[in-house]
Amino acid sequence: MYTTTTNILEFQIFDVNSRTGFMPFQPPISRLPTHWELWESLLDDARREQLQPADKLGITAEEMARSERWRSRVSQTPLLSINDMATSTVLLRRAHLVLTFLMHFYIHTIPPDSPVLIPRPISIPILQVAKVLDLPPVITFSDTVLYNWRWANNANESDSSLESQTLFTGLQDEEVFYLCSARIELRGVDALNIMCSVMDEIFCGDEITLGRLTTYLLELSTVIDALKSLLLDVRKGCDPEVYYNAVRPWFRGEDSDSYVPSEERRKWVFEGAEEYPDLNMLPPDRELSGASAGQSSLIHALDVFLGVDHDRPNSISYMKRMQRYMPHPHRCFLSHLGKNPRPLRDFVMTACSEDTPANSAMKEAYNKAVSSLKEFRDSHMVIAGLYIIGPARRAAEALVHDTSVSSSASLKDRAITGTGGTDLLSFLKGVKKQTVLTLIT
Ligand code: HEM
């Protein structure tokens, strides 16, 4: 039997809140209880000591030595049990955040020519926590954004008073970057509620449905326009060079150095994982991508709802892959939304077979919402150019002029030819093209 996806109770099943959307209604905890204090204090140390990524251009011997001392402390930390948190989602989420921040500090401070071996005090608990949460053992959008905020100074619940809880660098640029996404998630709640109303309307399908649908779709377009403005606001406090050179390096995944051939990329080895065969929750292809707002369930929900199809015939699409990095209930929400037996686009197409003013108005409103999503993606491409492609080119040029022995000739060649810029642009263009193809002509 058809059940509507739309009421608040169903939202709750999928851990979606009618006021905060994919962000939890209560701010996440900012520190684990004393039993796991060792993890929190190692993270405090990493930030206090301002550890630097080992491949930072011009890193000093003193900075490398400081990182090495910190890594040695991590390796000597006792292995803490997660048994006492296994039934608490709130604790598990903070544990995933703390352990993945520790893990990324650990990995990215290892000299570029040394293997990546994640020591047991981190590898075992992160695999255990990731298994219970059904998340990969790598930093995700949920760690940096969804479960990483609080209201500033206990202020009112207004999105302008948000703060991040945990940062790699302590820089304002990093916080602005995370909060840009957080504000989009909160503003997007209106879009989720409109989706509910639209689906209810289609379900009822009475005479005044078309008029109401038209109004809702125009509202949706306005909300998506607001998301675009919030995205562009990232430029107000996040400097592109700082983002690219100081912030982004920390949340790179195993596959992030796209200019390095995959067979030459360093594998991340989780020490002791073979002793826990039931922990084998890594995706079959061992993919461990870094955190990305491409993992935002909100944008995926807009795609699914409007009928933007990213699926590919013979391979799993980027968007599908990113869903593995979303909290399990949100992944289920998207899947549920995708199974809606009365998809909006089909409904509009069917209605449009009959040429009436009401049908035309609805089609126009639908196309306006899709166009707003396309324009969001246009702006996103501008941002990607500003924050990644430009700084990547400049970093590659600096590397070429770097005379230090640490930068090998082949690395310099690769960096200049393959900053990922061409791939990135053609990928983002492809996603945009799918959005444009969704318009109903
Ligand atoms: C400075 C800000 C941003 C930069 C530099 C940036 C960069 C990128 C990059 C490089 C990708 C390609 C895939 C990847 O590496 O994961 C990507 C994909 C994506 N990003 Fe962003 N992004 C930013 C902000 C955002 C925000 C705030 C959102 C929305 C919450 C967002 C949503 C997406 C989505 C949905 C994709 C998948 C492709 C698409 O749907 O067009 N991004 N982003």
Image (cartoon, rainbow, N blue to C red):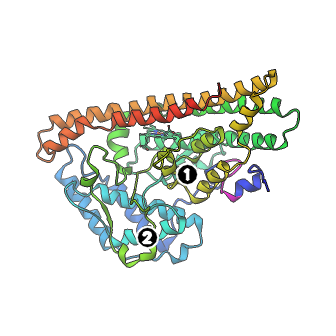
Which type of secondary structure does the marked residue at label 1 adopt? helix
Q: Is mark 2 within 8 Å of ligand 1?
A: no
Q: Which mark is residue 280?
A: 2
In the current view of this chain or complex, which residue is farthest to the right?
207
Residues at circles 1 and 2 in contact by the CB criterion of under 8 Å: no
Question: How far across and how far down the image is residue 210, in percent?
Answer: 81, 31
Q: Quadrant of the C terminus?
A: top right
Q: Is residue 345 left or right of residue 181?
A: right
Instruction: Decide which of tag 1 and tag 2 comes sooner along the chain.
Output: 1
Question: At x 74% / y 37%, what residue is drawn?
Answer: 347
Question: At x 35% / y 39%, what residue is drawn?
Answer: 244
The alpha-carbon separation of the residues under discs 1 and 2 comes to 25 Å
Q: Which mark is residue 102?
A: none
Residue 237 in sight in this render = no
Q: Amino acid at mark 1?
A: Leu
Which type of secondary structure does the marked residue at label 2 adopt? loop
Q: Is mark 1 within 8 Å of ligand 1?
A: no
Predominant SS along the magenta part: loop
Question: At x 40% / y 72%, what residue is drawn?
Answer: 124
Question: At x 54% / y 65%, what residue is drawn?
Answer: 133
Q: Which residues are magenta?
A: 13-20
Q: Which residue is mark 1?
A: 146
Could you say which quadrant of the image residue 10 lies in?
A: bottom right
Question: How far across and how far down the image is residue 143, in percent?
Answer: 49, 55
Taking depth in this image into account, of 196 and 264 the one nearest to the observer is: 264
Q: Is residue 59 left or right of residue 425?
A: left
Could you say which quadrant of the image residue 41 lies in?
A: bottom left
Residue 6 colored in magenta in the image: no
